[in-house]
Amino acid sequence: MAYADQQMSGNRIVAIIIVALIHIAVGYALVTGLAYSAVKKALERVTTVDIEEPPPPKDEPPPPPQKDVAPPPPVAPPPPINIAPAPPPIQTQPTIPPPAPPVLRVPPPAPVAAPPPPPPPATPPKRATPRNSTSSWVTDADYRSSWINQELAGTASFTLQISASGSVDGCSITGGSAPQPLKDATCSLIQRRARFNPATDGNGNKVASSYSSSIRWQIPAN
């Protein structure tokens, strides 16, 4: 009802405004000398306003009675939740030791192959050996009276060069305490009297060699 009354009042206000405007126009027409009949017809046409009122709204059925609903059971409030996130663990950069310097390994030198030993000789070599007695090389009879008077005595060392046939090819004095006349006599006597068995090599062949020894010159007793 209230909505219908508001709509109808609005239509009436519009109609009143229109009528007022028409009256103003009619007055203006009368002043200007317009025909009265024309104005009258216009007033009759305009003033007759058919206002249709909207039909009254239908009565709405009353709402159904509400049933008594049991109140919901009390709900305990949820426990407070700590939403603050835990701080992330602090990661420390591990200390990386510097790389160890490379170790240069020098390979050991290859062992030097020893030369093969010479084959064993078929016959062991032999040195030159005296063939006669060494005491016969120099005797007391070789002492001269002048050497006795001068009391010459001492030792004489010598080296003999022996040929492949066993003969003495050379003699040299290498030392000793005897005076020089006795040393010279030593080589002269031995070269004339000494005899040797020649030396041999590993194959049994006779070869030249040397022989070293010494004698003692001693004044013979009367």
Image: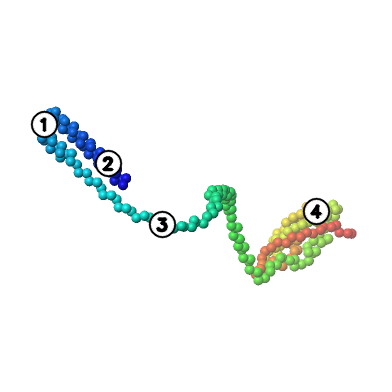
Q: Secondary structure at mark 2?
A: helix
Q: Nearer the viewer, mark 1 or mark 4?
A: 1
Mark pair 3, 2: CA separation: 37 Å
What amino acid is labelled 2 in the image?
Answer: Ser
Mark pair 3, 1: CA separation: 70 Å
Q: Nearer the viewer, mark 4 or mark 2?
A: 2
What amino acid is labelled 4 in the image?
Answer: Ser
Q: Quadrant of residue 46?
A: top left
**Residue at 25% in and 41% down:** 11
Q: Which residue is mark 3?
A: 65
Choose the circle earlier in sequence order: 4 or 2. 2
What amino acid is labelled 3 in the image?
Answer: Pro
**Residue at 82% in and 57% down:** 217
What amino acid is labelled 1 in the image?
Answer: Leu
Which residue is at the front of the view, 173 or 118? 118
Q: Which residue is mark 2?
A: 9
Which residue is at the front of the view, 107 or 113? 107
Q: Which residue is mark 4?
A: 177
Label 2 CA crowd tier, 10 Å (few <14, some 14–19, many 20+) = few
Q: Which residue is mark 1?
A: 34
User: In the shown orientation, is residue 44 left or right of residue 1?
Assistant: left
